[in-house]
Image: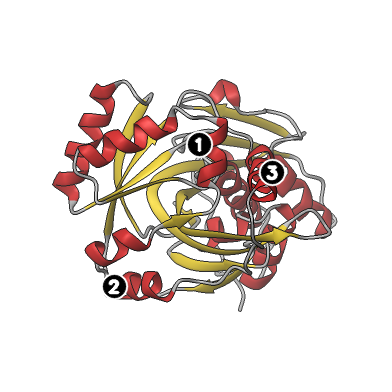
Amino acid sequence: MSQPAATPTGPAGTVTVRVPAKVNVQLSVGPLRPDGFHDLANVFLAVGLYDSVSATRAEAPLLTVSGPDAAQVPQDRTNLAARAAELLARRNGLAPDVHLHIAKDIPVAGGMAGGSADAAGALLACDRLWGLHTPREELLALCAELGSDVPFSLAGGAALGEGRGEVLTPLEVGGDFHWVFAVAEGGLSTPDVYRECDRLREAAEGGVPEPVAHEPLLAALRAGDTQALAPTLRNDLQPAALSLRPALAETLDTGLAAGALAALVSGSGPTCAFLAADADSAIRVAHALTASGTCRAARATSGPAPGATVV
């Protein structure tokens, strides 16, 4: 099914796409594969922290970034958003002559898929700008070429990611869940966290089971039941993230002491995620985390949120 045509908006026919952050409510990591990847059972939930990616016709490729931590974001061809534009252009015999501007609000290198979100946003924005009307399944396939988290950034909502995380099955969610995200100073490298996960597992006895979705967690999502979801949250990368950044344990303890129902490292970290009973509780937890000095900032929001959307 083709994407509906969009009327270009903004100056010079600029197309702007809003893309959400994510939290992994379950991240089960299988054994190391011969290709260096791991099979995953990755339950994604999109949450209401957003980047915006704008695409405008230009005489040559250009990428600019604004917002918190913009200085930490590469503004050359190594940026995943720039690679997304190049991939789409190459597949359609076009020159990637576009000015991409990323307005950041998702924490950088924080385990919330900000870079993947920007790639999905760039792909959709350029598709609309160039009038390609690429079918959604083809866009998802291009997303998978760019990275394991990119397809979910396009899709949003909630989904089970299998394979490397790029094979998505949409999940039903019966209500809103309230979250607080504690942003740490500096980032953590996702490859480094996976390597540390493998190292810790080598030192432990017993094999690593194949990853599967946890049915009680899926049932809690379907029911919109926060109390039932809290004890089912799981992240197999958390021990590795804590090994590389031990101070995160204090952040997790602080949020729990402030009333969060559950806490975990978000993805590969170092952002920590806290599930709250309701919106008021989330605000109280965020204030306590900010006052504690155990994190750089704390943000309250909710999910699920929609995926990449033209605005």
Percent coordinates x, y for residue 76 in the rendering: 73, 29
Residue position for label 2? 174
Percent coordinates x, y for residue 289 in the rendering: 27, 30
Identify the residue at image location x=32%, y=32%.
Answer: 298
Q: Residues within 10 Å of mark 1 (few under 14, many from 20)?
A: some
Residue 199 tag number: 3
Q: Residues within 10 Å of mark 3 (few under 14, many from 20)?
A: few
- Which label's residue is closer to the chain start, 2 or 3? 2
Q: Quadrant of the N terminus?
A: bottom right
Residue position for label 1? 242
Residues 7 and 136: in front is 136
SS for tag 1?
Answer: helix
Q: Which of pointers 3 and 1 indicates the residue nearer the eye?
A: 3
User: Tag count in the figure?
Assistant: 3
- Which label's residue is closer to the chain start, 3 or 1? 3
- Picture layout, residue 165 above or below residue 59: below
- Picture layout, residue 24 above or below residue 225: above
